Image: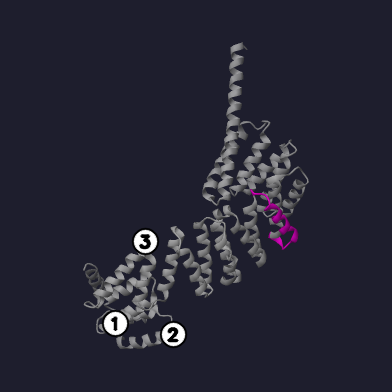
């Protein structure tokens, strides 16, 4: 071969090698980005990045399976497959990586993730054996924390265990694993009925600023606790929310989660106090708090004075689209009740606004009855009485309304409600729709 040919061949080999290593470098960087997104709760973005890592590393390994970095490539491939929810493929890649690993520090790390893949596949005994072997090796820092996190998780997934709790606590000492370890302690504490452990885990999360990125997961786990222990006990888990180190928007959302649980537990005063505290602030959480307070007031409202008070409550958050929608509904309620003095059917329309858009069933009941009382001979009076019946949850009130319907036994609306032939109902509804549209145009 000529000197020129040899030089060109050497250049081609070097170019191929550079391209190969550049691909691996980019894949490693992409994996780190995916890990950050995963830990921040950005699961969709992380998944897309893991899949890109899988594609790049698989191509790199196929192109140079005998490369000196083959074990590292397979290790990266297996980790990405594990994170992407492909434990069987991950186990195959990691088994091969363990066989090829020559560096003393690499094999124990590979075994940790191989154990994780086996655990995902339900092979808990195999996973524990892999972890025991890994922990005898040269593990340190985040790799050691991952191993103890996994060993504690596998053990506690099967049964309560002091050593499992100890492993999770030790894993939480490493900054990169701290939040995941606390979430796992919370999850497993609820599973095993350990309320004090759950409270401690959640208090730890509320004390970590970066844990606010996992707010949705935390709220979901508190929901699981509510289903298991009841709303009051679940609300107590969030007792430290008002002193949390989280930024105000996330802290406000945690406080609102507690307020909702207190309301479910029939602690109305506590729920209102927590929601009012958030409402005094700014931003989305404050608007959400005002909407929550408005909803609670409207749910029990029986007169139009409450609707006026709700308007005052909502006005400071009027830039929020949800608030604007509710304010528009309150405007319509006010307009239609005013029109009802001259056109009683407007009260029927106002009642529909109260029921459907304001979620104020008792206020709707009153307006439906107001229409039926002022125009009892109208063909839509029975429809109004039936709507009032649907809105009422008080059984004596429902009996009274059923009694009033006895005076309208021939109405198509009543006949339909009783499951009898009801000729003429469609025509009545069409006429009602036309009349209501005329009212809206006034």
Contact between marks 1 and 2 (CB within 8 A): the answer is no
Identify the secondary structure beneath mark 1. Answer: helix
Between discs 1 and 2, the one toward the N terminus: 1
| Residue bearing mark 3 | 318
Task: Note whether 235 is above or below 386 in the view shown.
Answer: above
Image disc number at residue 267: none
| Residue bearing mark 2 | 395
- Cα gap from disc 3 to disc 1, whole angstroms: 35 Å
The stretch drawn in magenta includes residue 385: no
- Cα gap from disc 2 to disc 3, whole angstroms: 38 Å
At horizontal 38% and vertical 78% (from top left) the residue drawn is 302
Q: Quadrant of the C terminus?
A: bottom left
Left or right relative to 330: residue 196: right
Left or right relative to 419: residue 126: right
Between disc 2 and disc 3, the foreground one is: 3
Task: Tell me where residue 14 appears, x and y as whole percent.
Answer: 61, 23
Q: Which residues are magenta?
A: 157-176
| Residue bearing mark 1 | 372
Between discs 2 and 3, the one toward the N terminus: 3
Q: Residues within 10 Å of mark 2 (few under 14, many from 20)?
A: few
């Amino acid at each position: 071969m000529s000197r020129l040919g040899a030089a060109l061949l050497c250049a081609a080999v070097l170019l191929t090698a550079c391209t190969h290593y550049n691909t691996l470098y980019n894949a490693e960087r992409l994996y780190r980005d995916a890990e950050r997104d995963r830990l921040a709760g950005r699961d969709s973005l992380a998944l897309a990045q893991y899949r890109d890592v899988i594609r790049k590393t698989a191509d790199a390994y196929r192109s140079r399976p005998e490369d000196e970095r083959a074990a590292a490539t397979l290790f990266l491939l297996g980790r990405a497959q594990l994170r992407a929810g492909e434990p069987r493929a991950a186990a195959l890649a990691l088994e091969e990586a363990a066989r090829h690993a020559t560096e003393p520090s690499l094999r124990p790390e590979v075994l940790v993730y191989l154990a994780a893949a086996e655990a995902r596949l339900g092979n808990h005994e195999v996973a524990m054996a892999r972890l025991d072997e890994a922990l005898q090796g040269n593990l340190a820092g985040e790799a050691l924390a991952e191993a103890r996190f996994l060993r504690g998780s596998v053990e506690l997934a099967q049964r309560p265990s002091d050593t499992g709790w100890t492993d999770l606590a030790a894993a939480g000492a490493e900054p990169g694993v701290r939040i995941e370890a606390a979430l796992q302690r919370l999850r497993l504490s609820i599973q095993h009925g350990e309320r004090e452990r759950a409270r401690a885990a959640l208090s730890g999360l509320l004390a970590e600023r970066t844990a606010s990125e996992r707010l949705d997961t935390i709220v979901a786990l508190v929901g699981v606790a509510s289903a298991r222990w009841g709303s009051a006990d679940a609300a107590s888990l969030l007792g430290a929310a008002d002193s949390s180190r989280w930024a105000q928007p996330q802290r406000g959302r945690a406080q609102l989660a507690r307020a909702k649980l207190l309301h479910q537990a029939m602690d109305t005063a506590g729920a209102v106090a927590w929601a009012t505290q958030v409402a005094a602030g700014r931003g989305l959480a404050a608007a959400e708090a005002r909407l929550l307070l408005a909803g609670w007031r409207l749910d029990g409202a029986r007169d139009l004075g409450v609707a006026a008070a709700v308007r005052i409550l909502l006005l400071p958050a009027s830039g929020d689209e949800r608030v604007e929608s509710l304010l528009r509904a309150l405007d319509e309620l006010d307009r239609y009740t005013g029109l009802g003095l001259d056109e009683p059917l407007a009260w029927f329309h106002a009642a529909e606004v109260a029921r459907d858009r304001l979620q104020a069933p008792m206020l709707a009941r009153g307006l439906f009855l107001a229409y039926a009382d002022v125009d009892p001979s109208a063909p839509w009076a029975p429809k109004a009485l039936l709507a009032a019946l649907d809105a009422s949850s008080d059984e004596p009130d429902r009996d009274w309304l059923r009694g009033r319907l006895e005076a309208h036994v021939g109405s198509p609306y009543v006949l339909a409600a009783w499951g009898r032939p009801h000729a003429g109902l469609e025509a009545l509804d069409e006429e009602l729709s036309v009349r209501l549209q005329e009212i809206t145009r006034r």
